[in-house]
Amino acid sequence: MSKVFSNGAIWAVVLAWALATAAQAHELAPKANAALALNSESLPLAARYAVTIGGRASGHSIEKTKSHTWYFYRDAQRIALLKGGVDEVWFRDAQQRISFERVFHDDERVVDYSTGELATLNVKVDWAALSRFVDPSELAQLKLVSKQGQGQETRLRLSGGVGRERLTVDWLPALQLPSRLTRQVQGGGSVQMVLVASAQISPPTWPQVGVKSAHYLHIDAADFGDMDYDPVVRKAEALDTRLGWRASHKHD
């Protein structure tokens, strides 16, 4: 999936990157799998990340650097990313069927994507890749720069070019997550994630998945064609388009 920064598009790219693993993932070489422990099971985990979106020149002005807090939750049935105004939650049932919901808190609406609708959109989900926050096909393009610690404290630094981006990852095999990840795009723009805290069970002070949105109105993504007038539908379609799920089209 290509990711191109344009004026005002950095946040859209971060959204696309965070869900990039929902697309088809490529297998890493066995040696790389072993080094990163990607063959091991991803255990249930809650993580809090500090996310910084770096400014870039835009005409005669400079876009300001923005800081955000993201919460990531992972277990066998659910993977969730809470970014403040928008939550993105993947579900997997006992039959391995995967569905998705996108929560818009400002609008108090939830958009539901059933297993069938994801298939209609040709979204092929790699659950193992999604649960690690980084597409293994990207990790496969990076070189091992250094290794620190042993056992549960092992930290691997990987770096290299991925398309038009420069990617640096401090990988924690024990958690199966990055402790730090930086994306720099040729020509400007950057995104940095830093793991601030993690726990097997999310602390009570952290936002809980589904609690705030318990009484929101739900929209079925399969009904978008009949709801072109709805501003939330337009927001969801715009995000789908940036992820490559839908073809771009103009509204009246």
Image (tube, rainbow, N blue to C red):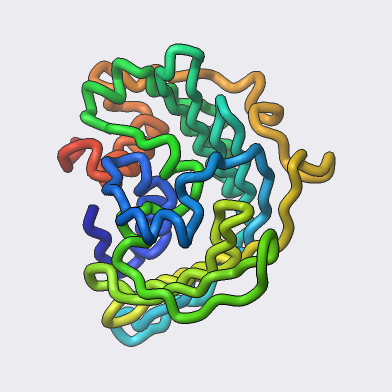
Residue farthest to the top? 95
Residue at figure coordinates x 69%, y 30% from the top left:
212
Residue at figure coordinates x 25%, y 22% from the top left:
119
Question: In this view of the protein, which residue sits in the foreground, 220 or 108?
Answer: 220
**Tag count in the figure?**
0
Residue at figure coordinates x 62%, y 54% from the top left:
174
Whole-percent x, y for residue 63 in the image: 43, 77
Q: Is residue 2 above or below residue 65?
A: above
Residue farthest to the bottom? 60
Question: In this view of the protein, which residue sits in the foreground, 91 or 224?
Answer: 91
Res 185 quadrant in image = bottom left
Question: In this view of the protein, which residue sits in the foreground, 45 or 1?
Answer: 45
Residue 184 seen in this snapshot: no
Q: Is residue 98 above or below residue 36?
A: above
Q: Is residue 198 above or below residue 105?
A: below
Q: Quadrant of the C terminus?
A: top left
Q: Is residue 188 left or right of residue 193?
A: left
Residue at figure coordinates x 61%, y 33% from the top left:
75
Residue 90 seen in this snapshot: yes
